[in-house]
Amino acid sequence: MKHPKQEKTVLIVKPDGVKRGLMGEVISRIESRGLKIIALEMVQVSKREADTHYPKDKEWIEGLGKNTLKTYDKYGHSPKKELGTDSALAIGRMVRAWLIEYFVSGPVVKMVIEGVHAIDMTRKIVGPTIPSFAEMGTIRGDFSVDSPVSANFEKRSVHNLVHASGNPEESRHEIGHWFKKSQIHSYNRSEENLMF
């Protein structure tokens, strides 16, 4: 069993975060929390890479659609009128396509982060997926105000600056998807013995 300090996760600064010059801010917040960046690269993502990044299983896609339907219901919008359907699966497929378009719209900065509870800590630093629900002090809460209502109205993905793996399974998939073993480095930060 690996030591908790060796937990790894993926964080990607998405095209809107890169275009807004927030790469340094994201890296600073990760490092100031005591987490280590053990791989880092800027790339232009291909449609194939973006398509493989996002799950393709029916349950996940339908979940996207159900979340979208909840948003329409909460804010009094008609999915049938605005999207032409109220099928969770059909809407999920639309949203997934918007996610891919967004991901390939400009360069991204991808990184592997390591540290104690790296997955949960990184997600705490970036904040909830929906920026308009993110608390101040998080990356999304401090730098984005986008919402699903606005995104759905404009038939696009929510611009939420960053992606962070949501669980260990996602993390394993994404590390293997985005990085070769030779790109991931091990080192000790000078203050590691003091912090934990």
Image: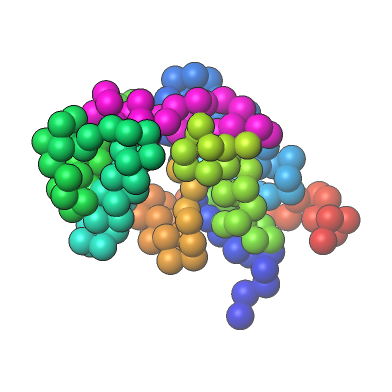
Query: Would residue 177 be visible to someone looking at this image?
Result: yes
Q: Is residue 160 left or right of residue 91?
A: right
- Residue sitting at 43 percent across and 56 percent down? 175
Q: Is residue 86 left or right of residue 194?
A: left
Along the line of sight, the residue nearer the viewer: 129 or 182? 129
Along the line of sight, the residue nearer the viewer: 41 or 174? 174
Query: What is the image's colouring?
Result: rainbow
- Depicted 49 relative to depicted 15: above or below: below
Q: Is residue 48 left or right of residue 157?
A: left
List x then y, in percent, for residue 32. 74, 40
Q: Is residue 34 left or right of residue 99?
A: right
Q: Quadrant of the C terminus?
A: bottom right
The residue segment tinted magenta is 136-162
Q: Is residue 83 magenta?
A: no
Residue positioned most to the top: 20
Along the line of sight, the residue nearer the viewer: 133 or 101? 133
- Depicted 181 relative to depicted 100: above or below: below
- Depicted 34 relative to depicted 169: above or below: above
Residue positioned most to the right: 194
Q: How many numbered discs sit on the rendered protein?
A: 0
- Residue sitting at 25 percent across and 41 percent down? 95
- Residue sitting at 66 percent across and 49 percent down? 36
List x then y, in percent, for residue 71. 36, 40
Residue positioned most to the left: 84
- Depicted 181 relative to depicted 24: above or below: below
- Residue sitting at 45 percent across and 33 percent down? 160
Q: Is residue 138 magenta?
A: yes
List x then y, in percent, for residue 120. 60, 56
Residue positioned most to the bottom: 1
Query: Would residue 180 be visible to someone looking at this image?
Result: no
List x then y, in percent, for residue 192. 80, 55
Q: Quadrant of the N terminus?
A: bottom right
